[in-house]
Image (spheres, helix red, strand yellow):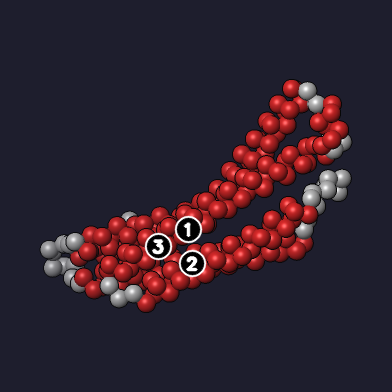
Amino acid sequence: MDELDLLKKDWNKTDNSYPTLSYDEIYKMAHSKSSSIVKWIFYISMIELGIGILLILINPRIDNQITYPLWLEVAGYLTIPVILYFIYKFYKNYKAITTTDNVKKLIKSILNTRKTVKHYVIFNLAFAGCFSAVAAFIGYTQASGGFEKFNETAHFKEYAILILVIILFCALILGMVYGIYYLLYGILLKRLNRNYKELKKLEV
């Protein structure tokens, strides 16, 4: 039970030994916590973008024998405007929450933030899945002497292994990405959802 839960519990007590908390005090507490959570979501997305751009500029190579096509690298650059759009949305959500002055607007801002984070995570998971599938395909076929050679000599067993490698690699990447986003955004969204439930009670 966090601080807001304790204060809400005290607010509902009739025992005079506890301080009486007004509706406005409970609202201000929920407003402050929601604003802080959304601010952290915005900061984390900025840090994530910075790390992504740094990795793209460094362009690390795991294996010099494997050459990935230019369009795959260009696809990485094309994600930057999309991420910038989401950062802009996070910033707007943060400003909306910090400037709101009533429960209904605050609830709406929280819902908008949850929706933005959901779309952001879905976009990144979709991109990570497509990118890892293509990377696994190119890496495996080039390690086998190139796609043309692989296609000429491969039989059902080789194609089955290729598909299995792609699936396992995608599952590994998606699992890692999902785990990272759960730690970064999932915990914050749980706290934001708890504030949303408290505000719904106040609205009634």
Q: SS class of the residue under badge 3?
A: helix
Q: 10 Å neighbourhood of mark 1: few (<14), some, or many (≥20)? A: many
Q: Position of residue 6 (x, y in %)?
A: 28, 61
What is the CA distance from the residue labelled 2 to the residue labelled 3? Answer: 9 Å
Residue at the spot x=40%, y=55% of the render? 190
Q: Which residue is drawn at the image coordinates 42% and 58% (left, top)? A: 114
Residue 106 lies in quadrant: bottom left
Image point 20% across, 65% down: which residue?
A: 11
- Which quadrant holds the N terminus? bottom left
Give the residue type at disc 3: Asn
Q: Which residue is mark 1?
A: 117
Q: Position of residue 164 (x, y in %)?
A: 68, 30
**Which of 192/100 is in front?**
100
> What kind of element bears circle 1?
helix
Could you tell me if residue 143 is visible in this image? no
Q: In the image, what residue occupies the spot 75% across and 64% down? A: 57
Secondary structure of the residue carrying tag 2 is: helix
Determine the CA span between mark 3 and mark 1: 9 Å
* Residue 193 figure quarter: bottom left
Q: Nearer the viewer, residue 185 or 22?
A: 185
Residue 177 at x, y percent in the picture:
59, 49
Pick the residue in front: 56 or 39: 56
Residues at marks 2 and 1, CA–CA distance in whole angstroms = 8 Å
Mark seen at residue 112: 3
Location of residue 204 with respect to 35 vertically, above or below:
above
Q: Earlier in the sequence, mark 3 or mark 1?
A: 3
Mark 2 or mark 1: name the one nearer the start of the chain: 2
In the rendered structure, which amino acid carries the disc numbered 1? Val
Q: Quadrant of the C terminus?
A: bottom left
> In the image, is 112 to the left or to the right of 51?
left
Pointer 2: what residue? 90
